[in-house]
Amino acid sequence: MSARNLFPFFSANPELAYLDSAATSQRLGSVIEKERDFSSGFNAPIHRSAYSLAFKATEEFEGVRKKTASLLGARAEEVVFSSSATAAFNLLANSLGYVEDPESPLFIGEGDEILLSRSEHNSVLLPFQELARRRGARLKFLPMTEEGEVCGWKEAIGEKTKVVAVSRLSNVTGAFAPVSEISEESHRAGAIVVSDLCQALAHERTDVKAMGIDFAAFSAHKVFGPTGLGFLYGRKPLLDLLPPSFFGGSMVESAWEDRSAVYKKAPWKFEAGTQPVSQAIAFEPALDFLQNRKEEEAALTRLLLEASSIPGVKILGPSSFKNRAPILSFAVDGVHPHDVAQFMDANGVAVRSGHQCAQILHRSFGFPSSTRASLSVYSETWEVDRFLDLLSRVRPYFLKGE
Amino acid sequence: MMEDLSNLYREVILEASREAHGRTENLEGGLVASSSHCAYASGFNPSCGDEVEMKVEMEGGDIKAVAWKGEGCAICTASLSIMTDLVQGKSRKEALNLYEDFLRLMDGRGKGEAPESLKDAAAFSGVAKFPMRIKCALLGWTTLKEALEEAGE
């Protein structure tokens, strides 16, 4: 059975070629049902009440923490709930800014360096840029190849490097980064490794331990789950050392009027206030789906890359289909990405246009923005065929008479 | 579905986007009248990264010429091009009135009926039906308004 049947969106929109899964994926029917079941059947507060319904809700919620950990190859205590990947990266960067002990492996001080790849999404770039500014640290960028692949980390990582942030899969170039190799080099220099897994998890089962990742984040809505839910992964000893930076109910053991509160252990010390409980519980079937899925994207990735042979189309990313996911950003000579996307939309293809929250990368490529087509488990050949056909007609439509 | 598209990208718009009247590589040079003074403004559309820098050359309260520099989509470029032609020779006040007319057209408050004053810019009435593109059509006009306000001081 095609995975497409598991997604009600496609019954509601049978004619549409949805090629914007890198922005948000469609949701599994089982996710939608689970959220309804929880909301209508066993909605109750978690972690605080003694009645059986509240216990069931708590069990389900904590069960999602376990399944998320299992998907990442991590332990349950290493997974923190958040409202989005952006919120998770802000939590991490803010908390790093709260580290006061200069001996801590997490301490970032004057003159230290935070090293980022050029393809980092604004949700990684900006929290770390602010952290660097507040701590007097320097923000530096790894070089990239002409095709947008991370390179030169051996030379770039040095004594002063405290954080290296490289997303496993770029939302623009579709290239997988060699995070394992970068981790090895980073750890040798005593730096921690942060990896954005938002795109990667839709296309592979990233194992954070095998890759040597210290901190990672992802959001549920990019992997067939609901919006409003994200996760932070942190390697246990580091998560223990990381202070909370968001305070309130549920994250505290005891509060006093005349001395500092005693906070819970990680991961709960990072979960102040009511968590996105409905979304978390609804996410459970998506985790099962991710755990059991088989990778079958190579053929579609190859087909998508045929775009590069269309006259006037320039790919922002690797031209080879190896180490690549079906995420394709491109520029059309003489036609603005907004016009490309509008032309596609009028013909039943949804693609992204703009800088895709990656302005630094776009500037490095020499284009202010691009158009992006991205596929997922439910994508079908006819969608890519229609996209390619339209792409070949864009320039004749807009540039006629030239 | 192509019908939709031709309502947005009317022939006059596609043509204007290719001709791009007023576009220049260098805003510094090319003054039309030696006695004139110039007002500058720039506009930015954060959702697509489009940027325009504009120079409005004034003489005795009238617009002698508009020059602009930047990259934009077909709607944005066409709007700048048609606006450049439209406001040339107009007084500051007349140009600001045209801005208001165009704004009303984009808001759809005129129910798609463009006042005659807008001439070729009336072709943008189709844009009002594509809310995501209204800011593309407006970028040039809001930048002009800013320049004129500066010139008015």
Image: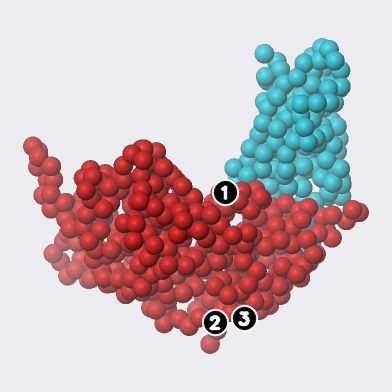
Chain colours: A red, B cyan
The crowding category of the residue bearing disc 2, from other C-alpha atoms within 10 Å (few below 14, some 14 to 19, many at least 20), is: few
User: Can residue A197 be seen?
Assistant: no
Question: Residue, x 53% and y 76% (percent of image)?
Answer: A377
Residue that badge 3 annotates: A299
Q: Quadrant of residue A12?
A: bottom right
> What amino acid does circle 1 point to?
Gln
Between discs 1 and 3, the one toward the N terminus: 3
Q: Residue A296's mark? A: 2
For the residues tagged 1 and 3, is the chain the same?
Answer: yes
Task: Report x, y in % for residue A255.
Answer: 12, 45
Q: Residue at 80%, 26% (x, y): give it.
A: B29
- Extreme residue toward the bottom, this view: A1
User: Which of labels 1 and 2 is toward the front?
Assistant: 1
Label 1 is found on which chain of the structure?
A
Locate residue B144, reporting x and y percent.
Answer: 72, 28
Q: For the residues tagged 3 and 2, is the chain the same?
A: yes
Residue A234 seen by the camera? yes
* Numbered badge on residue B89: none
Q: Looking at the figure, which quarter contains the N terminus of chain B? A: bottom right
Q: Quadrant of the C terminus of chain B?
A: top right
Name the chain letter of the residue that bears numbered label 2: A
Q: What SS does tag 3 mark?
A: helix
Q: Which residue is mark 1?
A: A359
Task: State the residue at coordinates (42%, 75%).
Answer: A205
Q: Amino acid at mark 2?
A: Glu
**Depth check: B77 or B96 in front?**
B77
